[in-house]
């Protein structure tokens, strides 16, 4: 798996219901959370795409599929454009550890423990995710992780903020 071009994907299709407004556009240090997420991935990938929002890749197989719909769009984009796989992050994850890609990238899917959207997904999983989303299930990321037997990478001592509510952003900015 190592050595080929890597696609970066920011999963940004959530409804931001706990945040109360479009959290991808919320500002932290003068930049949107979406911009922070893109900037965190950029040094590790050949290209960065946004999934699940206007101007980006549309969820697959249809809009409003949650994180798996965005991941599926990214996997199919990767497969059709010659990328080996996809590194993902959420739009509410303003920090991306520099040493994370080396820990994640391998022959199988992998996620960071406790942060299921910080992951590595071989492009060859595109059709498996199509099948998963076409079956009767809750479309949870946990179910998908079990299906593909994703590795869980531990990075002891690493605590990453996840912005779900306005107060999370306020606390981070202080």
Image (cartoon, grey):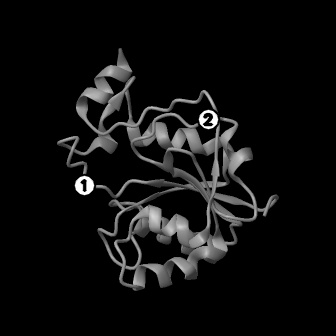
Measured from the top left, where is residue 93 in percent x and y? Answer: 45, 40
Position of the N terminus, as image quadrant, is bottom right
Seen in the picture, residue 122 relative to 96 is either above or below; the reply is below
The answer to whether residue 57 of the structure is visible from this angle is no
Q: Would you say 87 lies left or right of 142 here?
A: right
Disc 1 target residue: 15
Measured from the top left, where is residue 171 in percent x and y? Answer: 32, 21
Considering every residue shown, the one lying at the far left of the view is 20
User: Looking at the image, is mark 2 or mark 1 earlier in the sequence?
Assistant: 1
Measured from the top left, where is residue 135 in percent x and y? Answer: 40, 85
Measured from the top left, where is residue 81 in percent x and y? Answer: 64, 72
Seen in the picture, residue 115 relative to 86 is either above or below; the reply is above
Q: Please report the residue visible at 64 percent of the width from the left and 36 percent of the height from the top.
A: 155
The answer to whether residue 75 of the structure is visible from this angle is yes
Position of the C terminus, as image quadrant, is top left
Marker disc for residue 153 = none
Marker disc for residue 97 = 2
Q: Please report the residue visible at 68 percent of the width from the left and 51 percent of the height from the top.
A: 104
Q: Residues within 10 Å of mark 1 (few under 14, many from 20)?
A: few
């Amino acid at each position: 798996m190592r050595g080929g071009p890597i696609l970066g994907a920011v999963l940004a299709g959530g409804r931001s219901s706990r945040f109360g407004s479009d959290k991808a556009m919320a500002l932290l240090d003068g930049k949107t959370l979406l911009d922070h997420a893109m900037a965190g991935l950029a040094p590790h990938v050949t290209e960065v795409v946004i999934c699940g929002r206007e101007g980006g890749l549309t969820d697959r197989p249809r809009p409003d599929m949650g994180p798996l719909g965005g991941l599926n769009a990214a996997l199919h984009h990767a497969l059709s454009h010659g990328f080996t796989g996809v590194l993902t992050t959420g739009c509410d994850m303003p920090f991306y550890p520099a040493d994370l890609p080396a820990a994640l990238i391998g022959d199988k899917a992998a996620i960071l423990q406790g942060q299921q959207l910080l992951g590595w997904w071989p492009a060859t999983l595109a059709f498996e995710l199509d099948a998963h989303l076409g079956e009767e299930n809750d479309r949870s990321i946990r179910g998908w992780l079990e299906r593909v037997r994703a590795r869980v990478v531990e990075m002891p001592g690493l605590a990453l903020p996840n912005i779900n509510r306005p107060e999370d952003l306020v606390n981070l900015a202080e």
